[in-house]
Amino acid sequence: MSGGEVAGLIVAVFWAILVSFLAVVLVRLAQALRQATKLVADVTEQAVPLLGEASTALRSAHAQLARVDTITADVQEVTANASALSSTVAATFGGPLVKVAAFGFGVRRAVNLQAGDRTKTRTVLVGKALPGRRRRGSKG
């Protein structure tokens, strides 16, 4: 065998090993692509129902928000009506009730003064707390 024939034989063996290696790589790549295709199909099968459920949940949430918006508007209207009613009641009855209370206090004080209870007049000091009234009587 000559040197050219040996070199050709080495190149042929090298090419055979290279082709075998590439064949193994291509077979494994084909298996990986098949598994990836199967995985994508499984994910698609599970994702489509999930998207449908998410869409249903979103529609339900939107309906609930619309109801809450209506309730909020109604509560705001009731609050405004209650405030107006409170103002009306305070304006209508507040002044006369204060006058009646003042009149009652004045009558009570006048009766006490007429009854001879002049020694128990009290002085009001603005900004100072007065001690509570003491009862007379026996302790026991």
Image (spheres, rainbow, N blue to C red):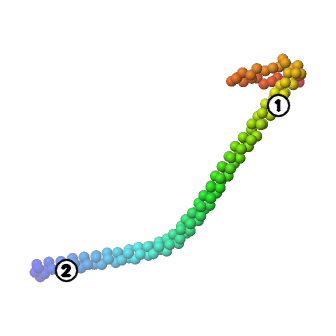
Provide residue 94's location: percent of width, then percent of height. 74, 38
- Where residue 71 sits, quadrant-wise, is bottom right
Give the amino acid at mark 2: Ala
Of all residues shown, which one is farthest toward the top?
A: 119
Q: Nearer the viewer, mark 2 or mark 1?
A: 1
* Viewer-side residue, 25 vs 123: 123
Does any portion of residue 65 appear in the rendered image? yes
Task: Please say if 82 is above or below 113.
Answer: below
**Amino acid carrying mark 1 in the image:** Gly
Residue at x 50% of width, y 72% of height: 48
Residue behind mark 1 = 104
The secondary structure type at the circle numbered 1 is helix
| Location of residue 67 in the rendering, given as x and y in whole percent from the top left corner | 62, 61
Q: Quadrant of residue 116?
A: top right
Q: Residue at x 70, y 23 (%)?
A: 126
The local secondary structure at tag 2 comes to helix
Report the residue marked by disc 2.
12
Q: Quadrant of the C terminus?
A: top right
Image-quadrant location for residue 92? top right
Give me the residue at 74% from left, 22% from top: 124
Point 36% across, 77% down: residue: 30
Position of residue 36 measured from the top left corner of the image (x, y, whole percent): 41, 73
Q: Is residue 8 left or right of residue 57?
A: left
Badge 2: how crowded within 10 Å, few (<14), some, or many (20+)?
Answer: few
Q: Closest to the observer: 110 or 45?
A: 110
Residue 136 shows up from this direction:
no
**First in sequence: mark 2 or mark 1?**
2
Q: Nearer the viewer, residue 68 or 80?
A: 80
Label 1 Cα neighbours within 10 Å, binned few <14 / some 14-19 / many ≥20: few
Q: CA distance from mark 2 to mark 1?
A: 127 Å
